[in-house]
Image (cartoon, grey):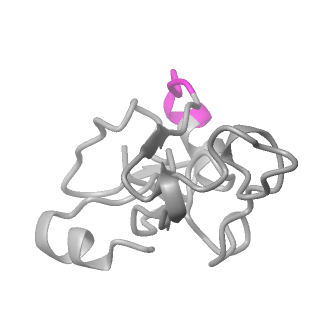
Amino acid sequence: VRLTDAVNDTGAVCLDGSPPAYYFRPGSSDGENKWIVHLMGGGWCFSLEDCAERAGSLLGSTSPEFWPDSEPFDDGFLSDLESVNPYFYNWNLVFAIYCDGGSFAGNVDEPLNVGGSMIYL
């Protein structure tokens, strides 16, 4: 889910200006009232150049080039396959994509020009 209302209402954007996004998978059976809320990690970018480089990657963008419309979780504890994830396969899942380079706390009104690239930090 791309949060275009967040962009329009609050200006919340990723480093490259794309809208913030998350994946949601509803739970089922005995997992319908249980939740996994996963905030993707990614660390900070420590310089403007580092942030500009990150803007063109899955750590700075929600572009479909990096994040498909359907959830990309085939293995590990986020999988919806019981054979792969016997404990959490049927739980509700929210996966918040990290894309601002500042631990979900980035806030800028106008983009910055870094070497010809416009970034939001």
Q: Between residue 59 and residue 31, name the one nearer to us.
A: 31
Residue 101 percent location from the top left of the image? 47, 36
Above or below, 66 relative to 60:
below
The quadrant in which the N terminus is found is: bottom left
Q: Between residue 79 and residue 114, name the one nearer to us.
A: 79
Q: Residue at x 62, y 43 (%)?
A: 88
Q: Is residue 13 left or right of residue 14?
A: left
Q: Residue at x 78, y 52 (%)?
A: 82
Residue 74 percent location from the top left of the image? 82, 56
Q: Is residue 118 left or right of residue 64?
A: left
Q: How many marks?
A: 0
The quadrant in which the C terminus is found is: top left
Above or below, 70 relative to 90:
below
User: Main SS of the magenta segment?
Assistant: loop
Q: Is residue 10 left or right of residue 36?
A: left
User: Is 64 colored magenta in this rendering?
Assistant: no
Residue 56 percent location from the top left of the image? 66, 56
Q: Is residue 29 visible?
A: yes
Furthest toward the front, the residue is 30
User: Is 49 colored magenta in this rendering?
Assistant: yes
Q: Residue at x 43, y 74 (%)?
A: 2
The residue segment tinted magenta is 43-50
Above or below, 52 relative to 45:
below
Tell me which corner region of the image, top left, top right, bottom left or bottom right, holds residue 66. bottom right
Tell me which corner region of the image, top left, top right, bottom left or bottom right, holds residue 87. top right
Q: Is residue 88 left or right of residue 19?
A: right
